Amino acid sequence: MPRPAGPVEQLALVTERLRELLITGEDFDAIYTHILAAPGKRVRARLVLACAGLLPDAADTAVPLPDAVDLACAMEMLHESSLVHDDICDGSLLRRDAPSVPAAFGVRTSARAGFHLAGASMQVVARVLTDNPEIFARVGEAPGITYADRLSDLSYGQ
């Protein structure tokens, strides 16, 4: 799969993949269709895709685009889960100019869907990490990703 130029151009891949991950013929299809109908700005997905682009592009260190897209989807799924539960807690009737999930589907069903969505996002992350152990084992080695590359420069309590 050719890699689109950048995170904004890759958002179409995220939208398509979210539909594949969420609309499965199972219990929460109607809720997930409702959520996907008003997607928001996908800021978190863009951040994940941009971070994936920071890693060196060598074949042995680059996250494959489908896996980077899946991580972006997982982040969006986790965020959407938090919004569903936020709307339950706040009693919000609207989200993104549409009925909130609890207003449209009821609190009990929405709570279950929110937990399911969070769990599904963690399954996606686990699959990507399992499929790419050599890449994610070395993420902390990339300059600027963590402070691990500067630990020798830090003096604790001295």
Image: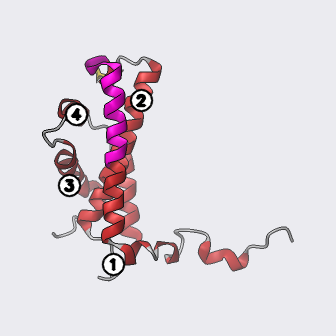
**Front residue (pair 89, 141):** 89
- The image position of residue 5, as x and y in percent, is 25, 65
The residue at 70%/80% (across/down) is 152
- Three-letter residue code for mark 3: Leu
- The image position of residue 26, as x and y in percent, is 17, 38
- Three-letter residue code for mark 1: Asp
Numbered disc in front, either 4 or 1 = 4
| Residue furthest left in the image | 25
Span highlighted in magenta in the image: 103-120
Q: Quadrant of residue 40?
A: top left
- Disc 3 target residue: 13
- Three-letter residue code for mark 2: His
- Disc 1 target residue: 57
Numbered disc in front, either 3 or 4 = 4
State the CA–CA distance, disc 4 to disc 1.
38 Å
Q: Are marks 1 and 3 in contact (CB under 8 Å)?
A: no
